[in-house]
Image: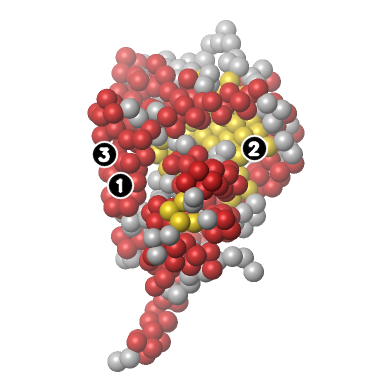
Amino acid sequence: MTDSFKRILKAPLGLWKKIKIKIFILSNYIQAQIDYWLGPDGSRSSPEKRLQPMQRRGDLGRPGTANTPRPSDATPERIALFIAYAKRLTHSNQAYIKTLKQAGFAVVYINNDRSNPEAADVLDSLCWRVFDRRNIGRDFGGFRDGVLLLHGEGHLERCQLLCIANDSMQFIPGRNAQALVAALEAFAASEKQALFSHISHQVQTHYQSYFQVLKPEVFRSRPFLQFWKNYRPLSHRGHCIYNGEIALSQTVYRRFPAVDTLYTSDKLQEVLESHYSAEGGVPAEEVLRLMPSPARTSQRRKIGYSLQQLMRQSDQHEKLTGAQLYSIADLIENGNPSHIAAFLYPVYLHCPFVKHDLCTAGSFTMAQAISLFRELVRQSLEAEESHQIECLVDEFKDLMYLRGIPLSYDNLPWEAAIKGITGTFVYPTTYE
């Protein structure tokens, strides 16, 4: 049987598989609508009802005593809404919260799961307010409840900086975290109105939602508050992306001209050019080593010009010089930067964030992702902090193996649809 005949036989099966996934996505959307309109935690509930004060061990058996707000509580100058989804307090989240606290933020921790009492004890010592939330609407539902709670209590009228973040990123403490603290101080002293970690041009240009810091002219604005009042928290991934993340950028953030993004292709280009002038170029092998594997892209015969440039220079053990460096920016700008630059930004721009879904999306192999993360943490932390290094690496490794790779979901189409594993990573070509 020839290869071409095998491909002909596989085509209907591949099409049916795609149709099944689309059916599951639609079914999940219908279920999310039903849960919102008819369920106890949807349209008939409110942020105050969904947000349950987290129970510490000393409060067990005394419902409602933990984290009870007092009228005398002063509004912090800087407030961070941190939305988590974890029963325990991870090493990553703890380091993240400590960094926000170091930057002067009073943290409102909202967990879309039920926290264990041990986590609650530690969180109570780190955070201003701590809640377990009845999960509807995923992280964007948590963002909405947090914003509306602060608005209803009058805190948005008095604070000067509002950070909104979630735990979909693995956090790197040490040097990279200190770079973030310095960037936050520079932003606070600047004329900029909003600060974001990443920007994406897929679908529509938008700021990726997992880290954003806003000044009063943004978070007290009518478009911002109206967006959150109108937003419908559906437990559906596509809804959160298109009607949440992208819509928030298009209807609110893109109205403000004085906006900065921490990790971008042009900032990476500047650092690489500096390296080029000092070293006579950037080794292509070193750059490609930090980027997603091109294996699947090559297998599907979808290698574009920019990727071809990088691969050819890497194969010949050559350095990237001059215009060849623009190939990296071309790939980042035409794809998902949090995947294509997942390790480029931490290495060259000291970004402290690494996405959790690198392996499930098929961007990186488990071995590559774990190895690069270990390297990053060792570079960011001092050698004497070996115990913390191993804890962070082991936690990341466990997460990668727990989530799996695209092949793990080959016979789980419903779960794949719910988690957005509807395809596998392929490098983009330049948009035509």
Give the distance between the C-alpha atoms of the residues marked 3 and 2, in whole angstroms. Answer: 34 Å
Of the pair 164 and 65, the residue shown nearer to us: 164
Instruction: State how far apart marks 1 and 3 are (Cα).
Output: 11 Å
Q: CA distance from mark 2 to mark 1?
A: 31 Å
Task: Tell me, yes or no, if residue 334 can be seen here.
Answer: yes
**Count of numbered circles in the view:** 3
| Dot 1 or dot 3, earlier in sequence | 1
Residue 95 picture quarter:
top left
Three-letter amino acid code at disc 1?
Ser
- Horizontal side, residue 169 vs residue 257: left or right: left
Neighbour tally class for label 3: few under 14, some 14-19, many 20 plus, Cα within 10 Å: some
**Residue named by callout 3:** 394
Which of the two discs, 3 and 2, labels the residue nearer the N terminus?
2
Residue 152 in view: no
- Residue at 38% across / 88% down in the picture? 4
Q: Amino acid at mark 2?
A: Asp
Which mark is on residue 260?
Answer: 2
Point out the image quarter for the C terminus.
bottom right
* Image quarter of residue 65: top left
Residue at 74% over, 39% down: 257
Q: Amino acid at mark 3?
A: Asp
Residue 152, relative to residue 324: is it above or below?
Answer: above
The residue that mark 1 highlights is 371
Give the mark, 2 or 1, whose residue is nearer the N terminus. Answer: 2
Horizontal side of residue 263 vs 121, given as left or right? right
